[in-house]
Amino acid sequence: MDTIVVGAAIVDGDGRLLAAQRAEPPELAGGWELPGGKVDPGEDEYTALLRECQEELGVVIKVGDRVGGDWPLNGGYVLRVWLAEIVGGSLEAREHLELRWLSDGELYDVPWLPADLPIVRAVQKALNEG
């Protein structure tokens, strides 16, 4: 069975998407991703998403619609992503090198990790349709 990883496509009131630059592991460091992480044993996906955003970013999020289905990752992982908005806390890069808000025209100004690129396209499509 695949290990579930959850991701948050955090969007602000101006329709900008939050991108996070990986600090580790070395083979992924410097690449950009959507924040999130693994679902812990006994934890549901929703709780994991809230926990990861609190731990990594210092924020409380409101979870919205799911983006696509299961996104396959290397090593037997599968990523599930939801749209989200920040409703509390103070945004900070606790586990990432940098955080950046990207407008629609800036979405591809950062080198997204290959696994995140199709998700970013799906998020962009969802935002443009919404």
Image: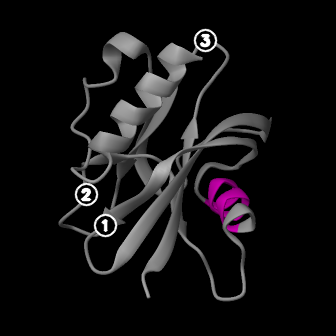
Q: CA distance from mark 2 to mark 1?
A: 16 Å
Does residue 105 belong to the magenta stretch?
A: no
Residue 1 vs residue 11, the one in the foreground:
1
Q: CA distance from mark 3 to mark 2?
A: 28 Å
Amino acid type, label 2: Ala
Q: Which residue has dot 2 on it?
A: 29
Q: Position of residue 2 (x, y in %)?
A: 42, 82
Q: Residue at x 25, y 72 (%)?
A: 74
Q: CA distance from mark 3 to mark 1?
A: 30 Å
Amino acid type, label 1: Leu
Badge 3 marks a residue whose secondary structure is loop
> Which is more N-terminal, label 2 or label 3?
3
Helix, strand or loop for the magenta stretch, by majority = helix
Q: Which residue has dot 3 on it?
A: 14
Question: In the picture, which quadrant includes the N terminus?
Answer: bottom left
Q: Is residue 104 above or below residue 72?
A: above
- The quarter of the picture where residue 121 lies is top left
Q: Is residue 106 above or below residue 1?
A: above
- The quarter of the picture where residue 59 lies is top right
Nearest to viewer (mark 3 / mark 1):
1
Q: Which residue has dot 1 on it?
A: 73
Q: Position of residue 115 (x, y in %)?
A: 27, 54
Badge 1 marks a residue whose secondary structure is strand
Nearest to viewer (mark 2 / mark 1):
1
Q: Residue at x 21, y 38 (%)?
A: 111
- Residue 21 showing in the rendered view: yes
Label placed on residue 83: none
Q: Which residues are magenta?
A: 48-55
- Residue closest to the far left: 27
Residue 49 vs residue 55, the one in the foreground:
49
